[in-house]
Image (cartoon, rainbow, N blue to C red):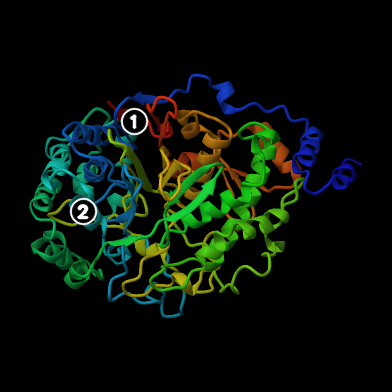
Amino acid sequence: MLRKLIQSLPHASFVTRASAVLLSASLTTTTLQAQQPGLEPTRAQHAMVVTVQHDASDAGVEILKEGGNAVDAAVAVGFALAVTYPAAGNLGGGGFMLIRDRHGRTHFLDYREKAPAAASRDMYLDEHGNVVPGMSLVGYKASGVPGSVAGLTYAQKHYGRLTLAQDMAPAIRLASEGFVLTAQEAHNLQSKNLTRFAVSARIFQRNGRFYQPGETFKQPELAETLRRIAKDPSDFYKGDMARQIADFEKAGGGLITADDLANYQVKERKPIRGRYRGYDIVTAPPPSSGGIVLVEILNILSGYDLPKLGPDRSAAQVHVITEAFRRAYMDRADYLGDPDFNNLPVKQMANRKYAAAWRASIDPAKPSPSKELVRPAGFMPPPPQAAPVKESTQTTHFSIVDKDGNAVSSTYTLNGGFGSGVTVEGLGFLLNDEMDDFTSKVGVPNVYGLIQSSANSIEPGKRPLSAMTPTIITTHGNWFHHGKLAYVMGTPGGSTIITTVANDIISAIDNGLNIQQVADAPRFHHQYLPDRLDLEKKFSVPVADQLQAMGYTINRLAVADEKNPGVWGDSELIAVDPKTGELLGGHDSRRDYGKAAGY
């Protein structure tokens, strides 16, 4: 009888229909923040740095106080995290940096890893054509050509204010003098990924005499490598250090050569732009899938008044947000890859009329089964056979705003926790396992049941598709007056990165949560396939039950939360108070060793 009542209501009257659904579920949900009123952001008048590791945050603030700008601080943080957060901070990985200067000009630096010249489409298959388990994840052949050193030094040279030696000084000090390990940090160093390789086990695990909480962890080999980079960054790609890396790779059976390193280049790309609730969204372009999928999600949701449906993380809000996730991830699955190797329908995906057509297919009373989802006709080209690529949850993000209003949002990674597990002998840094982000075999389901496509197949020089979504949000501007900085956002979390950033935006802009509450709110994720709604362990059980009653397959990730907490990311966020201009930092409490710091 209730369903007939709902169906009798006008289709445009979504709020009324959804309200009837909520009444049927006897919804009495309150927000997380009402239950935890003490969540307050860190406040600063001049500048703010938010990272996953407190020493790295302090390094950024140190550089800002010395007269550096946000890019200088980002370079300091990037190198500091290579010392203090070896699970993801790195010299041997790659990533993205989004820069917005105080005049409103934006720059996007792509320093993602690249496949070596000797890489081939079927390199991870056995003689029978089957994928060799773990070959793309662990060991020498798992690594792409690293881009982090090129990206950070490029940023400093083109957009920084201080010298590279000044920006790198905190990282060199942290490596040579050491830093004190917290309990979580000491436990992280016990990773089996490090135990497999002699150099890694020696440096990070003292050959089985594991570091304990409160001990000082020093890395003299890494300190010397950092000094060499600070003196001459080209050494890493074209000098003695490049030859040292190449010789080490060759001895271990890896593919990275001196020519691969010499040919690596940072790419400046045009950021993806969107609009939401009177704000301008500036975010990551391909080879990140994150920015365009984020814009598509927000375009779909722009037709709803979310607070009228219920509070933050209520069943009604989660339902429509999840249905937007489902549809945007379907497009991510079918179309995205490296823009240097593929023609990508980015403009079509960002089309607001296309979003409206997707929105019209959302049933306010129940989920749309992914296998029955039909893309609106007339907007997109025929899709190739494709599906979302794998991406590790072990990445890291940091956000920075300086006293002049320059902002940096940066996400970079080794891919898996501690990358390939391989530490370059004599240089003290870990290599990535980014080759796993490519399609190992076209047409074969991965561990998530997803069919992999040729759009992301392995090719020499190709950059693997990513979900990393560094994002900067401003008030709406125009051609003669740029908008004012409002938010700097981003997170790690593999395929959950995009949904986490979307939820962070919704919680802040639609639901009015302060930036610390945003960082700590319980998370949920849907990626089209597999057709299930993943909920963080701390997500409200009554709301989960209501969503299950609506027809969702619910997966509360208690095991993943405990065994792989990176699955839910690590939002490191900054908001600008629109009235006072005060900077508000939100560090994700899922990592107890990070912090928001400013002055």
Q: Which residue is mark 1?
A: 595
The residue sitting at 32% across, 37% down in the picture is: 405
In this view, 397 is above or below 116: above
Residue 517 seen in the figure: yes
Which amino acid type corresponds to the residue marked 1 in the rendered image? Answer: Lys
Residue 216 seen in the figure: no
**Residue that protrudes farthest toward the top in the picture:** 38
Residue 426: image location, x then y, percent: 12, 54
Q: Nearer the viewer, mark 1 or mark 2?
A: 2
Distance from the alpha carbon under mark 1 to that under mark 2: 28 Å
In this view, 307 is above or below 320: above
Q: SS class of the residue under badge 2?
A: helix
Quadrant the N terminus occupies: top right
Which amino acid type corresponds to the residue marked 2 in the rendered image? Answer: His
Residue 398: image location, x then y, percent: 34, 41
Residue 365: image location, x then y, percent: 77, 45
The residue sitting at 21% across, 53% down in the picture is: 158
Question: Any mark on residue 158, and which?
Answer: 2
- Front-most of residues 256 and 497: 497
Quadrant the C terminus occupies: top left
Left or right side of 531 for 190: left
Mark 2: few/some/many CA within 10 Å (<14, 14-19, 20+): few
The residue sitting at 26% across, 59% down in the picture is: 147
- Front-most of residues 3 and 302: 302
Asked whether disc 1 touches disc 2, contact meaning CB atoms under 8 Å apart, the reply is: no
Q: Earlier in the sequence, mark 1 or mark 2?
A: 2
Left or right side of 192 for 455: right
